[in-house]
């Protein structure tokens, strides 16, 4: 089909909510970043503007600053992982979780540096290391540091340690709570930042905010979910081992749902359970209120979910994410590149274009191991009769009579199917991380600007 740019007869921007307009997203995101920076800076602002404790020298003061900075960043992590939509909306929950990961590394590095500087240059201030003999507030600091180090190690090496996702998540939460409680106890016990009303108010705010996020995340939200259960109405096997679960709401359906978004799913478990996984909603809002999740058994909980019987009760927390054509209302067309089960958010966006009668052209480049493993290939082929969709299949192991693209999605494939006219279109990528990295580099070599490339992070944890 013709891949030249066309303007929709029914412009998508007329349907774009005001809070999804580019200027609104940028303003919202900037405000969130400013609040985060202020939160990290708050201990230093109060320390500088109020009565200052006696200086112990440059290294001592620098070490104290590292400790306060680490605790401020750690406190911020609870808000970042609480799935608060006003925080995730501008960036997408996947980006927030990625930032959480890197910021956690940074916080632990600051903690270790704080301890190391004191150990090398001010060792007497640390007292004895034996927790049976040490002062309680110093032991609390070491418990906090050990908890967060263990949290990072078990997260980064979860698969090598053979930790099932649900076990890891419970351990992750327990270590985070223990570490935060011990860190606050350490600060209060040492007393360097609690000797004035302003300083006490700071830590009261940190504690109230910390408890508030926990109550909302683990009590109020599950309670709301318990009043709005879903039921599985079908489980359909697709090519490539994918199973599509269709869910119908018993109470209220999803609110402000956009194509390409995802949700956390629990099936046949308590809404308070920690066992849940994020999956893309593979249908479009226009086809609601029922929703569908297309799940490929890749281990842990997903293998069990693929076997879900019809009638099973489910709980859905969502929608989340910004991998949506609704964020790209002024685009003349779209380039979508998927690998394997990464087709699901792209499929949702295509369904939305179809349901809206959107005439803008789409070029889909879809990589799979073999022709038999191409999930939704019949559904995609049928869409070509209803929307301006060009599909390019790329197979690692093509059949003998195959006359299409083979191998990987590389610069040669992209050059053959993407013209100069598509360079300014949004490029939506979803698939395994190595594929995303390689395709992103290839697109930039072709002259596609970085801000025209958007990708969905395949694994949040």
Image: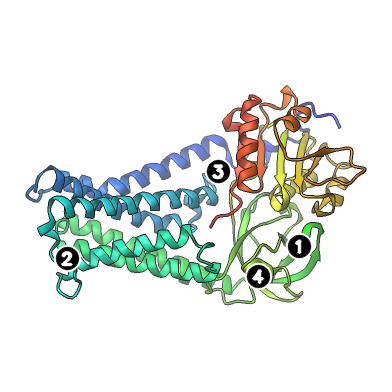
Q: Which residue is mark 3?
A: 19
- Nearer the camera: disc 4 or disc 1: 1
Residue 244, numbered circle: 1
First of labels 1, 2 by sequence position: 2
Q: Which residue is mark 4?
A: 251
Mark 1 surroundings: few (<14), some (14-19) or many (≥20) residues within 10 A: some
Q: Is residue 328 visible?
A: no
Between 461 and 271, the one lying in front of the other is: 461
Between 350 and 8, the one lying in front of the other is: 350
Locate residue 414, reporting x and y percent: 73, 31
Q: Secondary structure at mark 2?
A: helix
Residue 124, numbered circle: none
First of labels 4, 1 by sequence position: 1
The residues tagged by marks 2 and 3 sit, at their Cα atoms, a distance apart of 45 Å
First of labels 2, 3 by sequence position: 3
The residues tagged by marks 4 and 1 sit, at their Cα atoms, a distance apart of 22 Å
The residues tagged by marks 4 and 3 sit, at their Cα atoms, a distance apart of 26 Å
The residues tagged by marks 4 and 2 sit, at their Cα atoms, a distance apart of 49 Å
Say if 33 sits above or below 452 in the image: below
Between 115 and 250, the one lying in front of the other is: 115
Q: Secondary structure at mark 4?
A: loop
Say if 72 sits above or below 17 in the image: below
Q: Are marks 4 and 3 in contact (CB under 8 Å)?
A: no
- Nearer the camera: disc 4 or disc 2: 2
Q: Residue at x 28, y 67 (%)?
A: 143
């Amino acid at each position: 089909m013709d891949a030249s740019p066309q303007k929709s007869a029914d412009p998508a921007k007329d349907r774009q909510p005001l809070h999804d307009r580019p200027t609104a997203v940028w303003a919202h995101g900037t405000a969130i970043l400013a609040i985060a920076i202020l939160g990290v800076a708050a201990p230093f602002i109060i320390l500088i503007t109020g009565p200052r404790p006696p200086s112990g020298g440059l290294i001592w003061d620098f070490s104290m600053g590292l400790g306060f900075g680490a605790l401020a960043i750690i406190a911020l992590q609870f808000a970042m992982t609480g799935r608060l939509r006003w925080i995730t909306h501008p960036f997408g929950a996947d980006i927030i979780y990625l930032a959480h990961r890197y910021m956690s590394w940074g916080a632990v590095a600051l903690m270790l540096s704080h301890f190391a500087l004191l150990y090398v240059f001010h060792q007497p201030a640390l007292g004895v290391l034996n927790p049976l003999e040490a002062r309680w507030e110093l032991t609390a600091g070491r418990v906090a540091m050990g908890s967060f180090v263990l949290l990072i190690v078990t997260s980064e090496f979860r698969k090598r340690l053979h930790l099932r996702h649900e076990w890891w998540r419970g351990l992750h939460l327990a270590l985070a709570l223990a570490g935060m409680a011990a860190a606050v106890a350490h600060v209060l016990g040492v007393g360097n930042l609690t000797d004035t009303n302003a300083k006490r108010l700071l830590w009261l705010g940190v504690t109230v905010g910390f408890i508030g996020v926990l109550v909302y995340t683990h009590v109020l939200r599950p309670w709301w979910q318990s009043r709005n259960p879903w039921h599985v109405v079908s489980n359909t096997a697709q090519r490539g081992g994918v199973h599509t679960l269709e869910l119908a709401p018993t109470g209220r359906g999803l609110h402000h749902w956009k194509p390409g978004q995802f949700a956390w799913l629990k099936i046949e478990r308590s809404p308070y359970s920690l066992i849940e996984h994020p999956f893309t909603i593979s249908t479009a809002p226009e086809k609601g209120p029922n929703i569908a999740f297309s799940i490929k058994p890749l281990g842990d909980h997903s293998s069990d979910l693929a076997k879900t019987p019809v009638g099973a009760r489910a709980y859905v927390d969502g929608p989340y994410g910004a991998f949506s054509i609704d964020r790209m209302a002024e685009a003349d067309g779209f380039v979508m590149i998927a690998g394997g089960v990464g087709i699901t958010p792209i499929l949702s966006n295509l369904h939305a274009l179809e349901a809206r009668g959107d005439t803008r052209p789409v070029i889909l480049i879809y990589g799979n191991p073999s022709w038999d493993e191409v999930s939704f290939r019949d559904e995609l082929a049928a869409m070509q009769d209803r929307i301006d969709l060009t599909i390019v299949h790329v197979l690692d192991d093509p059949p003998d009579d195959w006359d299409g693209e083979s191998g990987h999605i590389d610069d040669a494939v992209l050059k053959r199917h993407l013209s100069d006219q598509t360079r300014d279109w949004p490029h939506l990528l979803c698939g395994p991380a190595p594929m995303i990295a390689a395709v992103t580099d290839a697109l930039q070599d072709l002259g596609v600007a970085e801000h025209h490339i958007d990708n969905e992070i395949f694994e949040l944890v």
